[in-house]
Amino acid sequence: QVRLQESGGGLLQPGGSLRLSCTVSGRDISSAVMGWFRQAPGKERDGILCISTNNINREYADSVKGRFTISRDNAKNMVYLQMNSLQPEDTGVYYCAKGLLGTCQLRPNAYNAWGQGTQVTVSS
């Protein structure tokens, strides 16, 4: 049974940076698309980035382009989310997810395994 665990969330001021990690156990992720999602208070869960199995192809939501990057280390079975220039609108619970399909997509229904999420709060 695959299990995903996010870590690295916290409280920080606008303009700050944060790196989230996702540790995957129970399944080798090298053949899986991986994604990061964000759920702001009172809103639906939105896909923000995904990365293909070859570590080359990525998709970004417009809201995070130029500020967030996704990477993966298949040898460690981990996925990372580097977040820079954080703003209050980036506040939310961040989820790591394993893709169901072979292509990088930002739709939640393209993923079949999820972590519990980690809270990121950006506030002055």
Image (spheres, grey):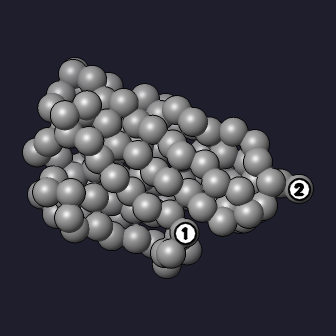
Q: In this rendering, would 23 be left or right of 48?
A: left
Q: Position of residue 102 (x, y in %)?
A: 12, 57
Task: Give the CA distance from mark 1 to mark 2.
Answer: 19 Å
Give the image quarter of residue 31: top left
The quadrant of the rendering that contains the N terminus is top left
Give the image quarter of residue 16: bottom right
Which residue, as the protein is rendered here, is positioned at the far bottom? 62
Residue 107 makes an appearance in the image: no
**Res. 42 mark:** none
Tag 1 near tag 2, CB within 8 Å? no
The quadrant of the rendering that contains the C terminus is bottom right
Q: In this rendering, would 27 be left or right of 5?
A: left
* Front residue of 37 and 45: 37
- The residue tagged with tag 2: helix, strand or loop? loop
Residue at the location (33% across, 59% down)?
Answer: 50
- Which residue does the numbered mark 2 point to in the structure image? 124
Q: Amino acid at mark 2?
A: Ser
Residue at the location (33% across, 70% down)?
Answer: 59
Q: Position of residue 91 (x, y in %)?
A: 69, 54
Q: Position of residue 63 (x, y in %)?
A: 55, 74
Q: Earlier in the sequence, mark 1 or mark 2?
A: 1
Q: In this rendering, would 98 be left or right of 84?
A: left
* Front residue of 3 and 45: 3
Residue at the location (80% across, 54% down)?
Answer: 13
**Res. 67 mark:** 1
Residue at the location (46% across, 51% down)?
Answer: 81
